[in-house]
Image (cartoon, rainbow, N blue to C red):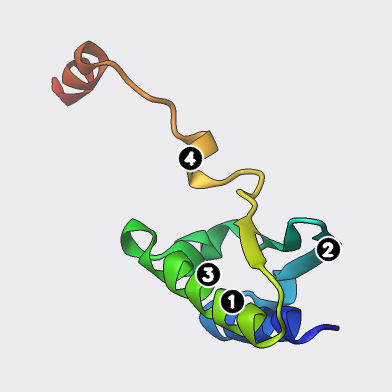
Amino acid sequence: MELDAQFLEYVIKALVDHPEDVKLDRKVDEMGVLLTLDVNPEDMGKVIGRSGNTAKAIRTLLRVVGMKNNARVNLKINEPEGGKRSSMDPKTVDQAMEDLKL
């Protein structure tokens, strides 16, 4: 496993509650290195962080690791099946107001 993938795996497994569910895929093409990350749906909030700050910091660190190895490293975080975003059904204002009525 390459250094960038080892670094990402180490950081992510330290952050999440389900390190056994961390899956990492590494692809190299003419654009550089693409690391694709899959985690347990319960751990998505920890990996992304408030306003995406944790994910942004991890991407910045990966770019630094890539610069040391003369490579452009990018991170893609896959949204898991059953994630909170996909299970939430957006409601209209009228529906939300109806739900508030007792």
Query: Is the residue under label 1 in contact with that under label 3 (CB below 8 Å)?
Result: yes
Tell me the residue at 54%/65% (across/down). Answer: 43
Q: Earlier in the sequence, mark 2 or mark 1?
A: 2
Along the line of sight, which residue is nearer the eye, 97 or 57? 57
Q: Secondary structure at mark 4?
A: helix
Q: Earlier in the sequence, mark 4 or mark 3?
A: 3
Tell me the residue at 61%/43% (across/down). Answer: 82
Query: In the figure, 52 relative to 93: above or below?
Result: below
Q: Which part of the image, by quadrant, shows the C terminus? A: top left
Q: Which mark, by number, is residue 10?
A: none
Pointer 4 residue: 85
Q: Secondary structure at mark 2?
A: strand
In screen coordinates, is 53 left or right of 94?
right
Q: Secondary structure at mark 1?
A: helix
| Disc 4 to disc 2, C-alpha distance | 30 Å
Pointer 3 residue: 59
Kindly identify the amino acid type of the residue bearing the numbered disc 2: Val
Q: Which part of the image, by quadrant, shows the N terminus? A: bottom right
Mark in the foreground, 2 or 3: 2
